[in-house]
Structures are given as structure tokens and as C-alpha cells.
Image (spheres, rainbow, N blue to C red):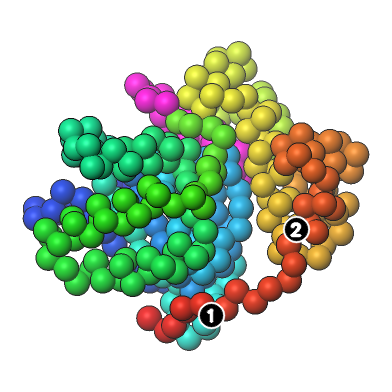
Amino acid sequence: MRAYLEHLPVSDTASWSLRDRRLDDAIPFQWHHHPEYELTLTLNSRGQRFVGDHVGTYGHADLVLIGPNLPHTWASRAKLLADAPHVALVFWFRGAWIAGMTDGTVELRPVRDLLERAQAGLAFAPETGLALMADFQDMFGLPPLQRLHGLLSILMRLAGDATARPLSRAVPQVVQGGRSRLDRVLAHLHRHYAEPLRMAELAGIAALSVSGLHRMFVRHTQTSITRYVAGLRIGEACSRLSTTMQPIGLIAEAVGYPSLANFNRQFRALRGMTPRAYRRMFAPRDVVGDGLKTP
């Protein structure tokens, strides 16, 4: 499966798009990208979030701002309220359009700075998602002009939010052709990162030589394939360490490290602590509630 270029809905009455997405069964893994910014608030759902080389868990009121052409997807594991759907409230807007307003408006400079930071994806605290939940929901009943005002108001609030944290270490560059080659490689890595890394196989997927593959990958992601895969593996390990009581050795093997010693070294290099210390940071807690209601 390759990361596909998503074509977003276009309106004759608005400069940007929004969607109230409701899924009864699951949020499926659909690895994709698009040239627009995306602001997504996910409700009544928990699972894994993939953004660039980031892999992490998400829960109710997950709020993320994603930059242009940054591959991403969510993949749910469960609903919090079984009789209600998974909900994703999604806003999309073009960089050139928003830049036309922020570059020439002193009052909107914080939004411009926010969008620059969002190139690699930004995740906000669940408390921020909960605080903005009503604003997101109300947007779908507003006329176009009031929606525009509402979007700018939300972006201004996010611009001043100190909880925002970057997600991906790899930031996509402007691609002139060859996007499908990179997408094929990225999709394969996200599906098979726990397996042994075979450069010849990846080169074949990209229809390039091994050296050509390396040059393309570094040029467009600003990191090497080896480091990118390590980020995916350690990201999945963090997800398991924080949400399960699986033995650390089992987690290491499941994410692609047969050697526990090697896993510990890689984990410390990327997270600055041991897997055991990372697990101790997460106390069991019930994430149901805090504003969750049947939509």
C-alpha cells in the first residue's frame, strides 16, 4: 500500500474545507498526504497516530495540526463509548491562502509562527482538545464568514498554547516529481518497520539504485532510512510501554530488535532514558469522561 495523494473537497462558498467524519467500526490505517494543512480533533477513539516518522498513541480529544505533504494516518484500536462512533472533526486549508492573510497582518503573526512549527506536525494536550471541542462542533452549523472567523480564532488560541509538541523528525520538502517513489518507500517502511531492513528491496520498490534511494530519501525527509526506521520502531515501543504491561524483551522483539541490549541503546539514544524509566512515567489512568458524550 502506498501513501496516496488525497484530493480534498472544494467549496464555491468557502476558502477552506471541513468534515465531520463518523465511523462506527474503526478508523482505518490509510497512509496519505495532501498539500493542505490539516487540523484534526479526534473524539471517542483511542489507538495509534502515525505522522511522518512519528508513531504514538492517541485518545479522546486528540488534537493535531499537520503541515503540507506530511504523510499521516490514524488507526483506532477501540472506542470509549461503544454505542457512539469514532469522530474526527477535520479542517483543511491551503498554505498560500493562509499565508496571504498572516504575512500582511501583524495581528496574525502568531498564526504564521504556528504554521511554521507545524511543518513536522504538532500535537496538543488533551485538555486543549477538550477546551476547543465545542468550538469545533459549532463550526459545522455556521455560515461561511463566521466559519472563517472561527477558524482564525481557533488558530490564534493554538498559537499561544504552550502544550504543543512536535511529532515528526522528518519534514517533507517540496517535491518536483518522484513523489510516488518516496510514497511507496514510506508506505512499505510503515507497514514493515519491525522486519529486517533490506536496502535492495527498498531500492526495488523505488525503482532506483541503493545509492539513488539514499539520496532521494535524505533529500526529501532530511534523515536517513536507518534513522527513520529507528524512529518508527521506538515510537511503537513507546506506545506499548505506556499502554500495556508487556515484558520489555517482548516489546523489543515485536518492534524489530531481537537483541534487548541493542533495543536499550537505541531507545536511550532517541528518548534519553531507558525503556523501564519511560514506562514508569505512565501511571494507570481512566481516560473516559472529561467532556465525552454521545455525539
Residue that appears at 39% across and 57% down: 40
| Type of the residue with mark 2 | Met
- Residue 239 percent across, percent down from the top left: 68, 56
Residue that appears at 54% across and 24% down: 222
Which label is found at residue 257? none
Question: Which residue position holds label 1?
Answer: 289
- Residue 266 percent across, percent down from the top left: 79, 36
Q: Of the residues under marks 2 and 1, which one precedes in the sequence?
A: 2
- Drawn side of residue 167 relative to residue 280, left or right: left
The crowd level at tag 1 (other Cα within 10 Å; few <14, some 14-19, many 20+) is few
Quadrant hosting residue 217: top right
Q: Is residue 191 visible?
A: yes
Question: Which residue position holds label 2?
Answer: 281
User: Could you tell me which quadrant the C terminus lies in?
Assistant: bottom left
Prevailing SS of the magenta stretch: helix
Membership of 84 in magenta stretch: no
Residue that appears at 25% across and 52% down: 152
Q: Secondary structure at mark 1?
A: loop
Residue that appears at 85% across and 53% down: 276
Start-end of magenta stretch? 173-192
Q: Is residue 152 above or below residue 286?
A: above
